[in-house]
Image (tube, rainbow, N blue to C red):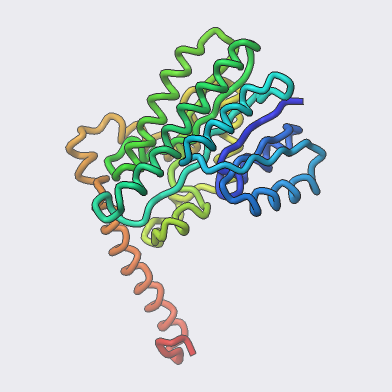
């Protein structure tokens, strides 16, 4: 039976990866810094699927704990066939509003951990002549929306490079580049995303399903939905001056303004439908 190691597996895309992989018969190694939640997720999956689940608590912003996960990837007795580098998070505030220590911890999670774990996994997978690495990146990597976007640009390029190096070894590398996905990510980063049209949001089950299919095919860049594939190509090919103008860190401020306007329009429509309601909703 195949085994998959998933980082950031207690919420968002990571949790969805865990459920879908268990549903296809994969044994799991679940990694997260939230140990209590990690064990709860493992029990929930065991109740539904007859698979073996190992929990490995680790904060991937910590170098020693990252090495612990890397060591698990090299285990010859219970090898990992699929590595899903999913762990990540956003920060509240712009680059200069957040302490540099927090930026460093975020970059350790988003980039250093991906580098270290991919290196450990790829070396043993190449020896076995089979395996796959799936790195969760983002279309944000084609934008100029701050350090997070820059880190995702690195993940995409790194994965492309790794895929070429692994060609012919029986091991593949895939970067998943979703757009906006309905997960806890934006809520945990205190980001109000109400200004975005509903059509721009993708559902996590669809994104993960497409990513796993692409990884099985050895596709290097997995971009779910035609809409986002088109948007990604436009962002990639557009003049950088234009990209900077539309996707600089100021984009979030513009989104907040739009969110306020959207909320006001919805409130006005509710009042038109029920004019007896007061502002407090009573």
Query: What is the quadrant of residue 27 in the picture?
Result: top right
Q: Residue at x 47, y 43 (%)?
A: 88
Instruction: Give the quarter of the image for residue 237.
Output: top left
As rendered, which of 165 and 72 lies closer to the eye? 72
Can you say which quadrant of the picture contains the N terminus? top right
Q: Position of residue 277 (x, y in %)?
A: 45, 89
The answer to whether 220 is drawn above or below residue 47 in the figure is above
- The tally of labels here is 0
The picture quadrant where one finds residue 231 is top left
Q: Residue furthest top?
A: 168
Q: Residue at x 34, y 47 (%)?
A: 101
Position of residue 117 measured from the top left corner of the image (x, y, whole percent): 52, 28
Give the residue drawn at x 44%, y 55%: 186
What is the residue that sits farthest to the left in this orientation? Answer: 241
Give me the residue at 58% from left, 32% from top: 69
Q: Quick one: 146 or 274, which is closer to the camera?
A: 146
Residue 175 horizontal/vertical position (percent):
48, 29
Q: Is residue 34 left or right of residue 202?
A: right
The percent position of residue 65, horizontal first and vertical second, equals 54, 37
20, above or below 214, in the image: below
Q: Nearer the viewer, residue 253 or 95?
A: 95
């Amino acid at each position: 039976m195949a085994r998959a190691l998933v980082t950031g597996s207690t919420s968002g895309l990571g949790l969805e990866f865990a459920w879908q992989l268990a549903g296809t018969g994969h044994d799991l190694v679940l990694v997260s810094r939230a140990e209590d939640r990690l064990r709860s997720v493992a029990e929930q999956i065991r109740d539904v699927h007859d698979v073996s689940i190992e929990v490995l608590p680790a904060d991937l912003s910590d170098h020693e704990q990252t090495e612990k996960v890397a060591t698990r990837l090299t285990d010859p007795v219970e090898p990992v066939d699929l590595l899903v580098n999913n762990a990540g998070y956003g920060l509240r505030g712009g680059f200069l509003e957040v302490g540099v220590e927090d930026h460093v911890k975020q970059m350790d999670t988003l980039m250093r951990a991906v580098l270290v774990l991919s290196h450990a996994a790829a070396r043993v997978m190449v020896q076995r002549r089979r395996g796959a690495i799936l790195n969760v990146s983002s279309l944000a990597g084609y934008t100029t929306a701050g350090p997070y976007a820059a880190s995702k640009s690195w993940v995409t390029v790194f994965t492309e490079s790794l895929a070429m190096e692994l060609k012919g070894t029986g091991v593949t590398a895939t970067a998943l580049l979703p757009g906006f996905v309905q997960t806890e990510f934006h809520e945990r980063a205190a980001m109000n995303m109400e200004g975005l049209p509903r059509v721009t949001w993708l559902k996590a089950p669809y994104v993960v399903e497409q990513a796993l299919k692409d990884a099985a095919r050895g596709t290097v860049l997995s971009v779910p939905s035609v809409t986002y594939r088109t948007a990604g190509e436009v962002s990639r090919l557009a003049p950088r001056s234009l990209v900077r103008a539309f996707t600089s860190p100021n984009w979030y401020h513009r989104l907040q303004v739009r969110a306020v306007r959207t909320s006001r329009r919805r409130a006005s429509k509710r009042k038109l439908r029920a004019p007896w309601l007061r502002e407090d909703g009573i």
